Image (cartoon, rainbow, N blue to C red):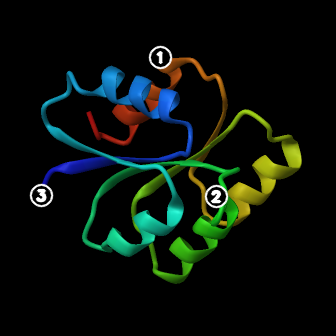
């Protein structure tokens, strides 16, 4: 099974930029969800790879999504991201199961290093 990088973010410009950055890697599937509810409807525990989750989205925010993933025994690496978070949000994301936290805008090299570290790309 191919690794997946799943981007869950309501910012279309950001998701398009991430797809552009990642599409050169042919050994991964890239999935984009503009809201967490659609993601939850499709999510499978059989998936492997990385979830890139925006913490502040309408309807179901990233914190609630992390809580839901914890209930579902998620085994994917989870990188929480936000342009509006503080240290308390970072701490809360880690407590809810986020593997990493990146402040937007983040250094793409730092993000790619994490993917290499997790053996995703």
Depth order, front residue of 114/86? 86
Q: Compute the Cα span from label 3 to label 2.
A: 26 Å
Mark 2 secondary-structure assignment: helix
Mark 3 vs 2, N-terminal side? 3
Identify the disc placed on residue 109. Answer: 1
Quadrant of res 103: top right
Q: Position of residue 99 (x, y in %)?
A: 56, 51
Q: Position of residue 67 (x, y in %)?
A: 63, 73
Residue name at image x 20 percent, y 27 percent: 25
> With respect to residue 60, does 28 lie above or below?
above
Q: Position of residue 65 (x, y in %)?
A: 59, 67
Mark 1 secondary-structure assignment: helix
Residue name at image x 38 percent, y 35 percent: 115
Which of discs 3 and 2 lies nearer the camera? The answer is 2
Note whether residue 66 is visible. yes
Identify the disc placed on residue 1. Answer: 3
Q: Quadrant of the C terminus?
A: top left
Reading the image, the residue beneath label 2 is 62
Question: How many residues crowd around disc 2 within 10 Å: few (fewer than 14), some, or many (20 or more)?
Answer: many
Question: How many residues crowd around disc 1 within 10 Å: few (fewer than 14), some, or many (20 or more)?
Answer: few
Q: Quadrant of the N terminus?
A: bottom left
Which of discs 1 and 2 lies nearer the camera? The answer is 2
Depth order, front residue of 72/65? 65
Q: Compute the Cα span from label 1 to label 2.
A: 23 Å
Note whether residue 112 is visible. no
Residue name at image x 23 percent, y 27 percent: 23
- Whether the residues at callouts 3 and 2 have beta carbons within 8 Å, the answer is no
Q: Position of residue 57 (x, y in %)?
A: 65, 52
Residue name at image x 54 percent, y 82 percent: 71
């Amino acid at each position: 099974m191919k690794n997946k990088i799943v981007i869950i973010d309501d910012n279309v410009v950001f998701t398009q930029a991430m797809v552009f950055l990642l599409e050169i890697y042919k050994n991964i599937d890239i999935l984009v969800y503009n809201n967490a509810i659609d993601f939850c409807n499709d999510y499978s525990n059989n998936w492997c790879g990385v979830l890139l989750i925006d913490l502040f989205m309408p309807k179901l925010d990233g914190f609630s999504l992390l809580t839901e993933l914890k209930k579902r025994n998620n085994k994917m690496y989870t990188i929480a991201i936000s342009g509006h978070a503080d240290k308390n949000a970072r701490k809360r994301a880690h407590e809810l199961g986020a593997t990493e936290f990146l402040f937007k805008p983040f250094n793409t090299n730092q993000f790619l290093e994490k993917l290499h570290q997790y053996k995703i790309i």
